[in-house]
Amino acid sequence: MLLEQSDFFNAAKVGATERKSVNVASVPQRSPFRYPGGKTWFIPDLRRWLAQTPRPHLLVEPFAGGAIVSITAVAENLVDNALLVEKDPMVAAVWRTILGGEAEWLAQRILDFDLSVENCHAVLDVPEVEPREEGFRTILRNRINHGGILAAGSGMLKHGEGGKGIASRWYPQTLAKRIRAIDAIRHRLTFVEGDGMDVMDAHKTEPSTAYFIDPPYTAGTKGKRAGNRLYVHFQLDHARLFNLAAEVAGDFLMTYDDDAEVMEMAVNRGLRVCKVPMKGTHHRETLELVIMPNLSQFS
Ligand SMILES: C[S@@+](CC[C@H](N)C(=O)[O-])C[C@H]1O[C@@H](n2cnc3c(N)ncnc32)[C@H](O)[C@@H]1O
């Protein structure tokens, strides 16, 4: 069923909302990553969604990336706990470091680092390093590469904002502050390195577990072009993901790009779909799909 934009939360019984694209500058940035496909624009919708009763005990984010959704949900006390899952070992190294008690080390490592092209090479060209250093260099790579892209083929920013090159997205004080803020709530955040769908499968019978599902957009024809170069792990069994979404006992929201094949997978399983506007890079407005459970899943 395709819903009108204004029906999005009406249908989710959370209160009607006028759909306009969100000004991301108005949303607090809590993740140390600048993540390609990041969901900062979704935060106002997330708040309305999680304000519904009964309040979920656990929020699972099976494709965590920069995990802005889980961190915000816990920081703003919209859920009790969140579980982040990520398959990319580089991204995993960051979450393991911060949530594993080494947040202060990472914050200090960032503050002490003297950013220059030579010093970046000295850090990034070492073949193997200890796990927390791997976390540090993932953050470094994420902040100095084009578009925050970690996948092979992405290079360092040459010009960046205002001709500042690699320094244009390197804000040590801000990053340290965000990492320390996550450290303060880490007892409510759990990280699993692995397959997000396996974790969904393990929780699928729990009614008070909710899911924010933001997979790589690599289904359909349009998606195959878009998602492939953004993430190291871009291949996904999208049909399995839709089957799991239709099966979970708890509530979920799933985002995808606006693609006919994606729409078909949702509609075939009786899931509700809403098209919402978002402003991407270069402030171009595009539509994304927000996919929700069939209401009968809750009756
Ligand atoms: C669209 S991004 C998520 C962005 C995130 N919502 C944010 O705001 O930063 C998708 C993520 O899923 C990860 N991924 C891909 N396949 C996965 C899998 N099977 N299990 C867990 N994570 C996976 C990718 O490495 C990527 O980080």
Image (tube, grey):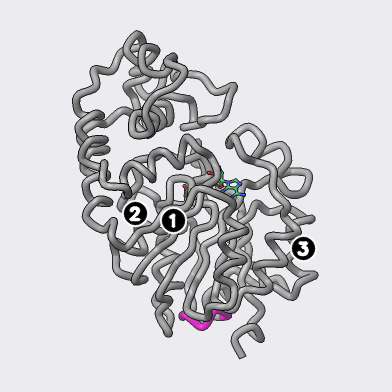
Please rate how many residues cluster around mark 1, counting C-alpha atoms within 10 Å: few if below 14, some from 14 to 19, many from 20.
some
* Residue on which disc 2 sits: 27
Q: Which amino acid type corresponds to the residue marked 3 in the rendered image?
A: Met
* Residue on which disc 1 sits: 22
Q: Which amino acid type corresponds to the residue marked 1 in the rendered image?
A: Val
Please rate how many residues cluster around mark 3, counting C-alpha atoms within 10 Å: few if below 14, some from 14 to 19, many from 20.
some
Please rate how many residues cluster around mark 2, counting C-alpha atoms within 10 Å: few if below 14, some from 14 to 19, many from 20.
some
Does label 3 or label 2 sit earlier along the sequence?
2
- Mark 1: C-beta under 8 Å from nearest atom of ligand 1: no
**Quarter of the image that includes the N terminus:** bottom right
- Looking at the image, which is closer to me, 136 or 37? 136
Q: Is residue 191 magenta?
A: no
The answer for how far apart the CA atoms under marks 1 and 2 are is 9 Å
Q: Position of residue 136 (x, y in %)?
A: 34, 30
- Looking at the image, which is closer to me, 86 or 175? 86
**Quarter of the image that includes the C terminus:** bottom right
Q: Is residue 122 above or below residue 100?
A: above
On the rendered structure, is 177 left or right of 7? left
SS of the residue under disc 3 = helix
Q: Name which quarter of the figure residue 106 lies in.
A: top left
* Residue on which disc 3 sits: 265
Residue depicted at 49% across the width and 41% down the height: 283
SS of the residue under disc 2 = loop
Q: Which region is colored magenta?
A: 11-15
Residue depicted at 66% across the width and 79% down the height: 294
| Residues tagged 1 and 2 counted as in contact (Cβ below 8 A) | yes
Residue 275 showing in the rendered view: yes
Considering every residue shown, the one lying at the far bottom of the view is 299
Q: Which amino acid type corresponds to the residue marked 2 in the rendered image?
A: Val
